Image: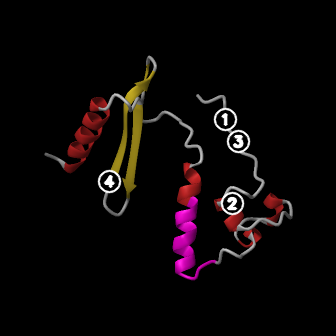
Amino acid sequence: MDPHMRIETMFQTTIQKNARIHNAYLLVHSDKRNVHLNLAEGSSGTIAAHADQRYLIASISKLFTSVLFARLAEQNKLSYDDPIHLYVEQELLNKLHIYKEQITRGISGFIIYLDTHLD
């Protein structure tokens, strides 16, 4: 069986077998390995999940940001003590004194934005 099809089948079967999972999404992309999988399974009420559907990821983005910061810090490409304006245009930050550690710990003061008008 084709590896992509095998992953798709495993994904669908796993979601369908577990009544506690209502819907799930899986996106895997690699130009280097010529892989692109964009899968969705399950439903939200009567609305079936589809792979191109927008969804809120909530605070999980902090995890991704923290991991990327840690990897770059290990490579000495940045420091947790660096002011954020070294990496983001000062005009955008409007001269705020925010450090990456504050952002990853959720104490930067940035307002959480939830788009309530998702298409």
Quickly name the residue at label 3: 113
Quickly name the residue at label 1: 115
Contact flag, marks 2 and 3 (Cβ < 8 Å): no
Q: Amino acid at mark 2?
A: Ile
In this rendering, the answer to whether 13 lies above or below 27 is: above
Frontmost of labels 4 and 3 is: 3
Secondary structure of the residue carrying tag 1 is loop
Contact flag, marks 1 and 2 (Cβ < 8 Å): no
How crowded pointer 3 is (Cα within 10 Å; few <14, some 14-19, many 20+) is rated as: few
Q: Amino acid at mark 1?
A: Asp
Mark closer to the chain start, 4 or 1: 4
Q: Which residues are magenta?
A: 65-78
Magenta segment's dominant SS is helix
In this rendering, the answer to whether 77 lies above or below 114 is: below
**Furthest-top residue in view?**
46
Q: Magenta span has 19?
A: no
How crowded pointer 4 is (Cα within 10 Å; few <14, some 14-19, many 20+) is rated as: few
Mark closer to the chain start, 2 or 3: 2
In this rendering, the answer to whether 80 lies above or below 104 is: below
Name which residue lies at 71% across and 76% down: 81
The alpha-carbon separation of the residues under discs 3 and 1 comes to 6 Å
Name which residue lies at 55% across and 50% down: 60
Q: Which quadrant does the N terminus fall into?
A: top left
Frontmost of labels 4 and 1 is: 1
